[in-house]
Image (tube, rainbow, N blue to C red):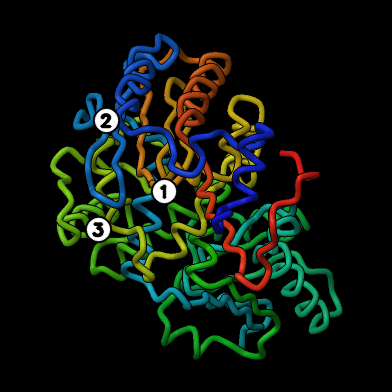
Amino acid sequence: MKRIGLLVLVAMATGLVPAHAATGFSSSAIPRLFTSMAQSPTLADPSIILIDRSTGEVVYENDSVSPRKPASVMKVLSATAALEYLDPEKQYKTRVFLGVKPGSIVFDGELDPWMTSSHKNAVADHRAWIGYLVGRAIAAIKEQSDSPIRKISIKYEGLYAADVIGIRSYFRSKGIITGATQVSSRQIVALSGAEIAETTSPTISTMVEFALLWSDNLLAERLARLAAKSAGYTLDDIGVSNTFHTMLINFNVDNSDLRVHDGSGLSKSNRVTAKLIADLLVTLRGNEKFAALYAGLPVGGVSGTLENRFIKTAPQAVGLVRAKTGTLNGTVSLAGYIESGEHEYIFVVIADQIPKGHTAATRARNALDRILGKIAAPLIMPVQIPASQETVSDPTLTI
């Protein structure tokens, strides 16, 4: 008996692994299968593209160059820009000082994208919490004063406008009125006394992974804007748009139909083509610089926003689909990678013409998952039995 993959044979014989698992779904059968997706009333004429990574061949496409609303698939562009233009090991600090002037507090930040005003998110995700910084500030001022604190003057640099609002709101919840003035870095030094608190964000790589895994809108937005600033553009939506276009030009990815109105995908005015996203995913795959992007993509039936998908609709695909989800009212999208035996496919599906409402979105997701599940298959490698362990056939062994 030759050295063969005994475990594979056993699995196939017992039905635990489909017979096509070692090679994946036949590529010649894919067009027919994906045509059924394109013609599905549930998906309402989606934009689709499927590319064989090993050959670069476009195995299937349907209306893949029409501008569509990407929803949170837009975060793929934000994550790419963050890893392209920012130091992946960069961490952001926010320091709080007693002011040299009594009754004043100084915030010296670096535009930390990890900052949150939500105590729930801070506890669950170990985020830098505004409440912690404010609490330390109040305690420090109380130590300096015998009378109740009624008003505090805030000087700051390197904070997002939303975080300044959050800081003032938290002070107000404690009965303290604040005035807040943005100052220069040079002024920060002159105005600062003793340091009373400090927070440090995770690395850019870690934040990119988190933003993709849980589709964190605010984090993705801030990462995109920081990338724009680092690329030499403005810290706003226009800067993000310019950054994305420049980046895609450098990657030789056609971006002529790209329309950018935010870095999170929440805007219904965003437009991308399925081909643009697919070409970008092909370019990034295997490039160590963008490893955090691949690592951050949710895994079907396992993690993040795909944690509960495929389990009932296509259990054979669990663990084999790694992709960014997208959902807006009237839009369901999914873009990423799927294992199919010896093949790995890059796919993008944008269904942005489905009826509005939760029911229609759920049906669209289920239909999409079932189709993808039909081509998903693990790569089963033959088990090599060393010659020293080969034995004669045992007539009592029955498979």
Residue wearing tag 2: 60
User: From the viewer's perspective, is the residue at label 3 or at label 2 nearer?
Assistant: 2
Mark number displayed over residue 213 = none
| Earlier-in-chain disc, 2 versus 1 | 2
User: From the viewer's perspective, is the residue at label 3 or at label 1 nearer?
Assistant: 1
Disc 2 to disc 1, C-alpha distance: 18 Å
- Location of residue 25 by image quarter: top left
- Location of residue 334 by image quarter: top left
Residue at the (22%, 25%) spot, across then down: 63
Residue 153 visible (yes or no): yes
Mark 1 crowdedness (10 Å alpha carbons): few <14, some 14-19, many ≥20: some
Q: Are marks 3 and 1 in contact (CB under 8 Å)?
A: no
| Earlier-in-chain disc, 3 versus 2 | 2
**Which quadrant does the C terminus fall into?**
top right
The type of residue carrying mark 1 is Glu
Residue 288 place in picture, x, y as percent: 38, 70
Q: Are marks 2 and 1 in contact (CB under 8 Å)?
A: no
Residue wearing tag 1: 342
The type of residue carrying mark 2 is Tyr
Which residue occupies the foreground of this view, 394 or 229?
Answer: 394
| Earlier-in-chain disc, 3 versus 1 | 3
Secondary element at image label 1: loop
Secondary element at image label 3: helix
Secondary element at image label 2: strand
Q: Is 319 left, or right, of 110 in this rendering?
A: right
Disc 3 to disc 2, C-alpha distance: 30 Å
Residue at the (57%, 75%) spot, across then down: 94
Q: Is 55 left, or right, of 359 in this rendering?
A: left
Residue at the (46%, 53%) spot, across then down: 220
Residue 322 place in picture, x, y as percent: 49, 46
Residue wearing tag 3: 243
Residue 327 place in picture, x, y as percent: 48, 31
